[in-house]
Amino acid sequence: MQLNLKVVSIKLIELKEFLDEKVDLYNRPSFIGSDPISIPHLYTLKEDIEIAGFLAATVAWGNRTMILNSARRMMGLMGNSPYDFIMSHNEDDLELIEGSIHRTFNSDDFKSLIRGLRHVYLNHHGMEDIFNTYQSGSSLQPAIHEFRRIIFEPHHDKRAEKHISDPFKGSAAKKINMYLRWMIRKDTNGVDFGIWKSISPSVLSCPLDVHSGNVARKLGLLSRKQSDAKAVSELDESLRELDSNDPVKYDFALFGLGVFEGFK
């Protein structure tokens, strides 16, 4: 069957206009307060922002109020100076951290990430450098795989590994893709930070969860039923057709349509 390219083009334009309107609606500072991105917005130092953002994204599942409470607790346990704590803590400091942090993320998991982050900054020039070094020409998924390997190089509790997903094992890696959007994508509305200047927003992948996946499927942006690494790759292609320079701005539209508008 031969496609009518004119009709396809018109539909794509209409879809882009519809989604651009939703991006404008949800990509606003009012979005910040109830979202995990509010945690790194507490800070101004680059390293504080990226550490706070990474830890907040790591516990970003379940009830949103609980997520924010858990993330704030982590910040408090680090004296509300995450970078200083990461670089200057000793094992006695870590012994004071105990109990549950957020659902199945416990104090041993938290300590493992603290040790791993110190290793990242001491021996690998920081988080941005790792992701910049290992990105491919069109994707950050290889860099996620390498970052996960590096952060777990120091001694750590094995169970902590489940809290950082690996796209090379088929995961959609939703939380860390969300985190990368925060760090890399720069908008004019003050939501995403854009502090990692060495990486282009064009290589970002949409944080794919049940809400964004269902909306993407209904809109014809995604055909794969499983929300996995292959689905992320397919959605990347679709969103880059809509905006090759800033494809993940549509995360605001897909999330807003699914969570706030019940678009299913």
Image (cartoon, helix red, strand yellow):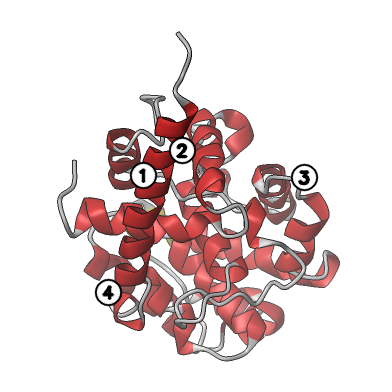
Which of the two residues, 11 or 53, is positioned nearer the viewer here? Answer: 11
Q: CA distance from mark 2 to mark 3?
A: 29 Å
Q: Are marks 2 and 1 in contact (CB under 8 Å)?
A: no
Identify the residue shown where x is 79% and y is 65%.
129
In front: mark 2 or mark 4? 2
Dot 2 or dot 4, earlier in sequence: 2
Q: Position of residue 54 (x, y in %)?
A: 54, 66
Q: Amino acid at mark 3?
A: Ser
Left or right placement of residue 241 versus residue 46 in this view = left
Dot 2 or dot 1, earlier in sequence: 2
Left or right placement of residue 47 versus residue 80 in this view = right
Left or right placement of residue 156 versus residue 176 in this view = right
Decide: few, some or many residues near mark 4? Use Cα within 10 Å; few <14, some 14-19, many ≥20. Answer: few
Q: Position of residue 159 (x, y in %)?
A: 51, 44
Q: Identify the residue under disc 3.
A: 136
Q: Quadrant of the N terminus?
A: top left
* Residue located farthest toward the top when viewing the structure as drawn: 1
Q: Amino acid at mark 1?
A: Asp
Q: Are marks 2 and 4 in contact (CB under 8 Å)?
A: no
Label ID, residue 34: 4
Identify the residue shown where x is 73% and y is 57%.
131
- SS under mark 2: helix
Q: CA distance from mark 4 to mark 3?
A: 33 Å
Label ID, residue 9: 2
Left or right placement of residue 183 versus residue 224 in this view = right
Q: CA distance from mark 2 to mark 4?
A: 37 Å
Relative vertical location of residue 167 with respect to residue 254 in this rendering, above or below:
above
Q: Quadrant of the C terminus?
A: top left
Which of the two residues, 147 or 107, is positioned nearer the viewer here? Answer: 147
Q: Identify the residue under disc 1.
A: 209
